[in-house]
Image (cartoon, grey):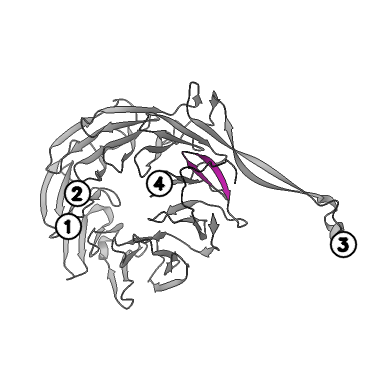
């Protein structure tokens, strides 16, 4: 794996959907770089510090959220002199997003007073009153024809279906939730999933015309749903709960066909490979080298310097995983499935139980079994699947990058001193990774995955 040099960043960074550009926020400046060379292609100056950026789907426009003002600025790569500024006045702006046609921007005001659709073509705007959430509660169909927007009025939750061409409301239906948490269209646009707040375990499947296809409730007492994710093929719906389990529903009957439990002790029989990150000290003995007297005097007390690398050891079961007990007197307990992500082929799903933050679980949905467990030294910060093949990359805030494929797992050391990887993102074509430290970033070129390769666990 080849790494670029590091560059400054002070906020969000994002690859363009066409995989050609990388947008980087540096204080109030928006820097657009070419992905292949990382040379600066465009430089835009905003009116305040950039707290959010999002590319339009056609990669021609990009918006910047200046939520401290609050204000939105949009820029065009093809016409650098063109600019757009959106200011809601006293209502404020808490969030902004692009529509699928890349020619409209949707903003949500503070206190969820209204959602506004702004047109870049004719400066027209359309309002939807009482949106349920700021950054959540809006989902678009994959074909870009419709938007589902959650609203709340008279103490009841509703879903508004809008046409993304005319922005007319095509239909409104009430949903059976106490306090709607979020909404997602299925990738094939055939169904809508809605789930309730953690205080009420309820997952609802609706058809686009508002018919309730299924209601699912795993249990009644206790905190409920924490994460929900469709498989890319739309055949499976994974629901992660506070009871440290994920349940996978099928798209034909909407019944649970798989339950995966995250236990602190893994016992046999178990077909999963258990990888544990361990230190591998390297001793550099300089005692027998011919050195100058001055150098030898400075290093007399450190004749043998120690450098630490890491590797994965393959562990045997039974094994007890590092876990922590959530504090009962504090809200939002660190427990349950807080991270959940499908591989591009829908065969694997990776999960993190927040009461075991340093452990990543990889489940094989095709064979209904646990495929691997990765035990890290530090809590898992981020994990992302290669968009082109079943390859998982994760980071823990250390100087190392970790990879898993069906062939094995291995550790990679970033070649920069004091560069800790806190976040990572794939380019849409799977050719490179964006790695973020607190105030800098670099890119890593990722080799194509050879299915027949025998990966070792070491760098």
Whole-number angstrom distance, CA of label 4 to CA of label 1: 32 Å
Of residue 149 and residue 389, the one placed in the foreground of this image is: 389
Residue 359 at what x, y percent from top left? 50, 36
Of marks 2 and 1, the one in the foreground:
1
Extreme residue toward the right, this view: 293
Observer able to see residue 216: yes
Of marks 1 and 3, the one in the foreground:
3
Whole-number angstrom distance, CA of label 3 to CA of label 2: 73 Å
Of residue 395 and residue 63, the one placed in the foreground of this image is: 395
Horizontally, is 282 left or right of 397 in the view? Answer: right
The reply to whether discs 1 and 3 touch (Cβ–Cβ < 8 Å) is no
Of marks 4 and 2, the one in the foreground:
4
Which residues are drawn in magenta?
Answer: 402-413
Q: Which residue is mark 2?
A: 148
- Label 1 Cα crowd, 10 Å radius (few <14 / some 14-19 / many 20+): many
The reply to whether discs 4 and 1 touch (Cβ–Cβ < 8 Å) is no
Q: Which residue is mark 3?
A: 292
Q: Could you tell me which secondary element the residue under label 2 belongs to? A: strand
Q: Could you tell me which secondary element the residue under label 1 belongs to? A: loop
Residue 392 at what x, y percent from top left? 45, 44
For marks 4 and 2 on the same chain, the one whose residue lies earlier in the sequence: 2
Whole-number angstrom distance, CA of label 3 to CA of label 4: 53 Å
Q: Which residue is mark 4?
A: 389
For marks 3 and 2 on the same chain, the one whose residue lies earlier in the sequence: 2
Q: Is residue 391 magenta?
A: no
Q: Which residue is mark 1?
A: 164
Whole-number angstrom distance, CA of label 1 to CA of label 3: 74 Å
């Amino acid at each position: 794996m080849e790494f670029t040099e590091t560059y400054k960043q002070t906020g969000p960074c994002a690859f363009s959907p066409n995989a050609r550009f990388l947008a980087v926020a540096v204080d109030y400046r928006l820097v657009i770089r070419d992905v292949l060379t990382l040379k600066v292609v465009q430089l835009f100056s905003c009116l305040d510090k950039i707290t959010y950026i999002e590319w339009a789907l056609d990669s021609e426009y990009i918006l910047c959220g200046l939520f401290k003002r609050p204000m939105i600025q949009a820029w065009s790569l093809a016409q650098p002199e063109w600019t757009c500024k959106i200011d809601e006045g006293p209502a404020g702006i808490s969030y902004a997003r692009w529509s699928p046609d890349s020619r409209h921007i949707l903003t949500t005001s503070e206190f969820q007073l209204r959602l506004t659709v702004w047109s870049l073509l004719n400066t027209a705007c359309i309002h939807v009153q009482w949106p349920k959430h700021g950054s959540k509660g809006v989902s678009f169909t994959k074909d870009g024809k419709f938007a589902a927007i959650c609203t709340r009025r008279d103490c009841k939750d509703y879903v508004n279906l809008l046409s993304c061409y005319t922005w007319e409301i095509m239909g409104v239906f009430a949903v059976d939730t106490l306090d709607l948490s979020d909404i997602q269209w299925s990738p094939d646009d055939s169904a809508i999933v809605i789930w309730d707040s953690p205080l009420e375990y309820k997952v609802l499947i609706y058809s686009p015309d508002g018919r309730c296809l299924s209601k699912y409730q795993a249990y009644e007492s206790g905190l409920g749903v924490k994460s929900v994710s469709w498989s890319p093929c739309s055949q499976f719906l994974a629901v992660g709960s506070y009871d440290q389990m994920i349940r996978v529903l099928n798209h034909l009957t909407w019944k649970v066909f798989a339950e995966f439990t995250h236990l602190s002790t893994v016992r046999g029989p178990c077909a999963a490979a258990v990888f544990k990150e361990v230190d591998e000290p390297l001793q550099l003995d300089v005692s027998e080298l011919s050195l100058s007297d001055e150098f030898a005097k400075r290093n007399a007390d450190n004749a043998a310097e120690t450098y630490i690398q890491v590797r994965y050891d393959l562990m045997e079961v039974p094994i007890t995983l590092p876990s922590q007990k959530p504090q009962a007197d504090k809200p939002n307990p660190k427990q349950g499935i807080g991270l959940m992500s499908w591989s591009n082929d829908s065969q694997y799903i990776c999960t993190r139980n927040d009461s075991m933050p340093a452990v990543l679980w990889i489940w094989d949905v095709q064979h209904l079994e646990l495929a691997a467990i990765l035990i890290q030294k530090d809590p898992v910060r981020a994990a992302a699947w290669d968009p082109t093949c079943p390859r998982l990359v994760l980071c823990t805030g250390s100087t190392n990058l970790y990879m898993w494929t069906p062939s094995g797992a291995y550790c990679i050391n970033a070649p920069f001193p004091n560069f800790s990887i806190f976040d990572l993102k794939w380019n849409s074509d799977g050719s490179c990774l964006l790695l973020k430290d607190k105030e800098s970033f670099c890119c890593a070129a990722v080799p194509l995955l050879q299915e027949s390769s025998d990966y070792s666990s070491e760098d």
